[in-house]
Image (tube, rainbow, N blue to C red):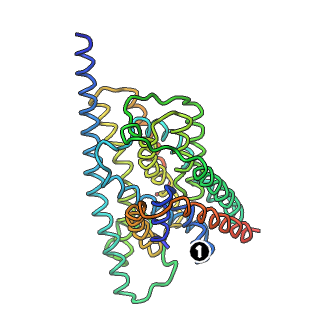
């Protein structure tokens, strides 16, 4: 499961939590909070791995990341804490809503391809992030969803930085990868303290995700990504509906 | 003259950020390796000792029990330590950023890094 998650994540630029949590709850019938805890460990492992191998000069804007993380981390702590009080039914409904949103985002990406242009334009150094109030507000929402549902929130953070704050796409992506680790760290201790992290599930899943991500990066040039995107949209819709049915 | 001073400042900033990137990457590699090592050791030992894994299994060890290392289960302790190491890595990276900005006397970034670090400390404290 972790391997498949990692491959899909690398091929489609999505965090693994959006597949992993529904899969663990629907297929393996684990409690949703345990699935979320597992996903958070997977995110931490992937974030650490990516940071260890990131090429120099293609790294995140640490200053921008930390500024946004002031809001994201606060949201993540609140979301993680709230997840302990919200019923599993409500968590499942919320998650299915986010799954549908993600499907819409993937559809939007498929229809509106961003021209990757040259690598220099992706990693332009001469830029000034703008629209900070909106950026910080949306970052806190991303954090709350991440903490509550065990997702990375990258599908909010990357468009937020690129489209709203006018950060070059390559830097936005690298910065988001840096941020997801901090956001996951803000949430994982709360789940740890609640006993929602089970190493027997979390560790092989984390290894699988990391390995899958490496395989996915290797496979990326060999696949027609748009075809996979549309398959994924179908899968996400099925998962979202299934989670709704399970909740109701 | 002013241009030269600005260029020198920018070079110094780039150098500091380069050092920050190097330090973070080194730290990520070390902690990832050690954390993965602990998790792998614990997981493999658990399979050897128990033979069969029953899902979802036990949750991670609570923090007070970390001090009771004479008690079993060593496997669960090792896996828990590995997970904690990965979980602490982002906090340490934020701390490195804090000291880098402090060295550069970039007080706004120092304050930002400090706030994020405090938030992470708060979450750690909430979980303990």
- Residue furthest top as drawn: B1
Between B60 and B68, the one nearer to me in the picture: B60
Query: Toward which corner of the image does residue A59 lie, by quadrant?
Result: top left
Spot occupied by residue A140 in the image (x, y as percentages of width and height): 57, 42
Asked whether, in this view, residue A45 is left or right of residue B105, the answer is right
Residue B118, visible in the rendered structure: no
Between A181 and A174, the one nearer to me in the picture: A174
- Residue furthest bottom as drawn: B51
Vertical relation: B75 (above or below) B20: below
Vertical relation: A227 (above or below) A54: below
Asked whether, in this view, residue B110 is left or right of residue B56, the answer is left
Residue A90, visible in the rendered structure: yes
Vertical relation: A135 (above or below) A16: above
Identify residue for label 1.
A30
Image quadrant where one finds the N terminus of chain B: top left
Spot occupied by residue B101 in the image (x, y as percentages of width and height): 32, 32
Query: Toward which corner of the image does residue A62 lie, by quadrant?
Result: top left
Spot occupied by residue A104 in the image (x, y as percentages of width and height): 65, 53
Residue at image position (60%, 62%) is A230
Between A106 and A42, the one nearer to me in the picture: A106
Q: Residues within 10 Å of mark 1 (few under 14, many from 20)?
A: some
Residue at image position (48%, 41%) is A69
């Amino acid at each position: 499961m972790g391997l498949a998650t990692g491959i899909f994540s690398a091929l489609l630029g999505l965090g693994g939590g959006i597949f992993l949590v529904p899969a663990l709850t629907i297929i393996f019938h684990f409690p949703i909070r345990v699935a979320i805890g597992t996903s958070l460990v997977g995110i931490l492992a992937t974030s650490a791995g990516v940071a260890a191998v990131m090429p120099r000069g293609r790294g995140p804007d640490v200053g921008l990341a930390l500024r946004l993380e002031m809001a994201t981390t606060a949201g993540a702590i609140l979301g993680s804490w709230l997840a302990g009080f919200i019923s599993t039914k409500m968590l499942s409904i919320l998650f299915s809503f986010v799954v549908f949103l993600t499907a819409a985002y993937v559809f939007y990406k498929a229809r509106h391809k961003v021209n990757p242009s040259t690598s220099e334009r992706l990693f332009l150094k001469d830029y000034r992030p703008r629209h900070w109030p909106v950026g910080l507000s949306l970052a806190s929402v991303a954090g709350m969803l991440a903490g509550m549902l065990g997702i990375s929130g990258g599908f909010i953070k990357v468009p937020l930085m690129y489209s709203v704050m006018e950060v070059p796409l390559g830097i936005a992506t690298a910065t988001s990868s840096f941020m997801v680790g901090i956001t996951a760290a803000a949430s994982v201790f709360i789940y740890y303290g609640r006993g929602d992290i089970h190493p027997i599930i979390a560790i092989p899943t984390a290894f699988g995700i990391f390995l899958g991500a490496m395989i996915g990066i290797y496979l990326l040039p060999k696949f027609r990504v748009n075809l996979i995107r549309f398959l994924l949209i179908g899968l996400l819709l099925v998962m979202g509906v299934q989670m709704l049915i399970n909740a109701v | 003259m002013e241009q030269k001073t600005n260029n020198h400042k920018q070079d110094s900033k780039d150098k500091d950020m380069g050092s920050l990137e190097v330090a973070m990457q080194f730290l990520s590699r070390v902690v990832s390796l050690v954390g993965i090592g602990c998790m792998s050791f614990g997981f493999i030992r658990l399979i050897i000792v128990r033979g069969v894994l029953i899902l979802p299994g036990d949750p991670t060890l609570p923090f007070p029990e970390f001090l009771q290392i004479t008690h079993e289960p060593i496997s669960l302790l090792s896996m828990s330590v590995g997970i904690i190491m990965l979980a602490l890595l982002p906090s340490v990276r934020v701390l490195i950023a804090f000291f880098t900005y402090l060295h550069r006397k970039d007080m706004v970034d120092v304050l930002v890094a400090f706030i994020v670090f405090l938030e992470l400390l708060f979450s750690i404290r909430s979980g303990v």
